Amino acid sequence: NELSLAMHNSVINRDFCIYLQPKQNQNEQLIGAEALVRWVHPKLGVLAPDAFIKMAEETNAILPIGNLVLERSCEQLKLWQLEESTQHLQLSVNLSAKQIWQSTFYQDIINIVEAYDIDHSKLILEVTESVLIQDVNDATEKLEKLRNYGIRISLDDFGTGYSSLNYLRSLPLDEIKIDRSFIQDVAQDTQAQVMVKSILDLAESFHLKVVSEGVETREQIEVLRKLGNTFYQGYFFSKPLPINEFHEKYLKNK
Ligand code: G
Ligand code: G
Ligand code: MN
Ligand code: NA
């Protein structure tokens, strides 16, 4: 159809960019960002992932788009690493299952990381449970290799999958991101608080960092602070921003 033809052309023309959503530590200091892809459609303008990621996966366009996102992300990390004031910043990149299933997956990542000559430890790859569930052994082996190379691995949308606890034990992880459905309720709902507290305790015993996703209010932050140690990401701080706006807002006087 028309949109998939346009996507095919846009892959050739590299009409994709990343927006950055800030990630803060418990003291609410900026520690990095998540890269979120946007399709800069020649006629329709900037499109968000929900408008095209599904189609990109169905047509396998997600493979070149995924590589482009990684390139743009490593390029940004390289720029941050040239300045003392920004070299501590980390950048998280979402991976689709299709990317991980490629036999060239590991080497594709390494090639990009080496081409941009970045500090490996500042790149975080986000995977979802559903990705891992389909072939745990294959995913574990590949992610373990990336981790041995120094790249960090994060489990996205944590709590929405169905056998989360087993995975925490067996997967090569550095971080989990608590799904925003838990965070949405955490200020009012004591059950959500109990859930989040258990996740934070569990993560601590596994030496995993935790990001609370979808933080929208001060109240949520105060409740989360009492429950344990977590980083924050969400509209309370900022929606995903074009790179120049991100720099304007967070790094202007640095
Ligand atoms: O940017 P937005 O808030 O609309 O993101 C929506 C969804 O799209 C999220 O679930 C996110 O994980 C996914 N997504 C964003 N960027 C990428 C990307 O570069 N690759 C893949 N595979 N998914 C992405
Ligand atoms: O699935 P993933 O976590 O990769 O996707 C992040 C998605 O969540 C993006 O679509 C982003 O725009 C959205 N998002 C980020 N912060 C918030 C928030 O505070 N509230 C809501 N409702 N969505 C958010
Ligand atoms: Mn994500
Ligand atoms: Na998520």
Image (cartoon, grey):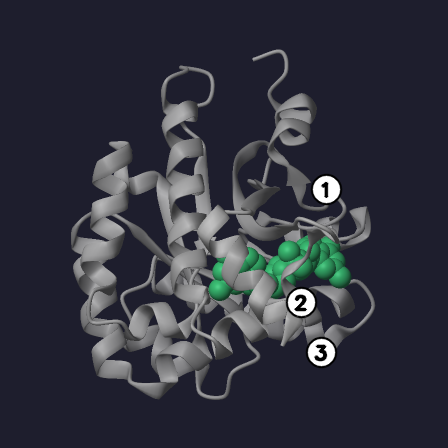
What type is the residue that disc 2 sits on? Asp
Q: Secondary structure at mark 1?
A: loop
What type is the residue that disc 3 sits on? Gln
Per the image, the residue denoted by label 3 is: 191
Q: Nearer the viewer, mark 3 or mark 2?
A: 2
Of the image marks 3 and 2, the number of the one nearer the N terminus? 2
Which residue is painted at 44% across and 87% down in the image? 163
Q: Residues within 10 Å of mark 3 (few under 14, many from 20)?
A: few
Which residue is painted at 50% across and 63% down in the image? 8
The answer to whether the residue bearing label 3 lies less than 8 angstroms from the nearest atom of ligand 2 is no
Left or right: residue 125 versus residue 104 is right
Per the image, the residue denoted by label 2 is: 50
**Contact? badges 3 and 2 (CB < 8 Å):** no
Image quadrant occupied by the N terminus: bottom right
Q: Is residue 236 above or below residue 212?
A: above
The answer to whether the residue bearing label 2 lies less than 8 angstroms from the nearest atom of ligand 1 is yes
Report the number of discs.
3
Q: Position of residue 95 (x, y in %)?
A: 42, 63
Residue 159 got which mark?
none
User: What distance separates the C-alpha of mark 2 from that of mark 1?
Assistant: 19 Å
Q: Is residue 244 above or below residue 204?
A: above
Q: Residues within 10 Å of mark 1 (few under 14, many from 20)?
A: some
Q: Nearer the viewer, mark 2 or mark 1?
A: 2
Of the image marks 1 and 3, the number of the one nearer the N terminus? 3
Of the image marks 2 and 1, the number of the one nearer the N terminus? 2
Q: Position of residue 176 (x, y in %)?
A: 46, 62
Left or right: residue 78 versus residue 36 is left
User: What distance separates the C-alpha of mark 1 from that of mark 3?
Assistant: 27 Å
